[in-house]
Amino acid sequence: MLYAAQAGKYDVRVRFHSNKIAGKAMLEIGEQKFDLSFSTDQNEVLFQGIELTKRNLNLQATLEMPGKIHGAWQVDVMKL
């Protein structure tokens, strides 16, 4: 759950433990869905400029790698 205290644009950083495997980070905030690919040397991805309204929102961040789906280690949400 995420409470957006102010409407506006936000950056969302999804952090994960490096598995030395490339894959895709998937982010769902409310009804919005995003994805970014990551390489073997990355341990985070940054979703930029996501427009949010002031309200409670469901937030889910997962990592999809060949044959596996994992949850993220940490998610940081920053108001721009």
Image (cartoon, helix red, strand yellow):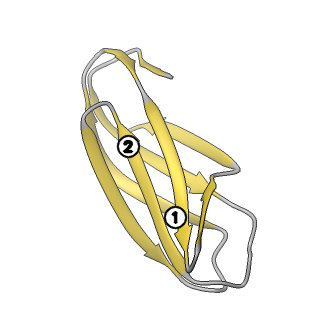
Label 1 or label 2, whichever comes before in sequence order: 2
Q: Is 53 drawn above or below residue 18 in the view shown?
A: above
Disc number placed over residue 45 in the picture, else none: 1
| Left or right, residue 57 beside residue 39 | left
| Left or right, residue 9 beside residue 3 | left
Q: Is 8 drawn above or below residue 54 in the view shown?
A: below
Secondary structure state at the residue bearing disc 2:
strand
Q: Residue lying furthest front in this view?
A: 67
Q: Quadrant of residue 17?
A: bottom right
Query: How many marks on residues?
Result: 2
Circle 1 residues within 10 Å: few <14, some 14–19, many ≥20: many
- Residue placed most toward the observer, 7 or 67: 67
| Left or right, residue 7 beside residue 24 | left
Q: Position of residue 3 (x, y in %)?
A: 45, 17
- Residue placed most toward the observer, 7 or 61: 61
- Image point 42% across, 26% down: which residue? 58
Q: Quadrant of residue 26?
A: bottom left
Disc 1 to disc 2: CB gap under 8 Å: no
Distance in Å between CA atoms under marks 1 and 2: 14 Å
Q: Is 31 drawn above or below residue 74 in the view shown?
A: above
Q: Position of residue 10 (x, y in %)?
A: 36, 39
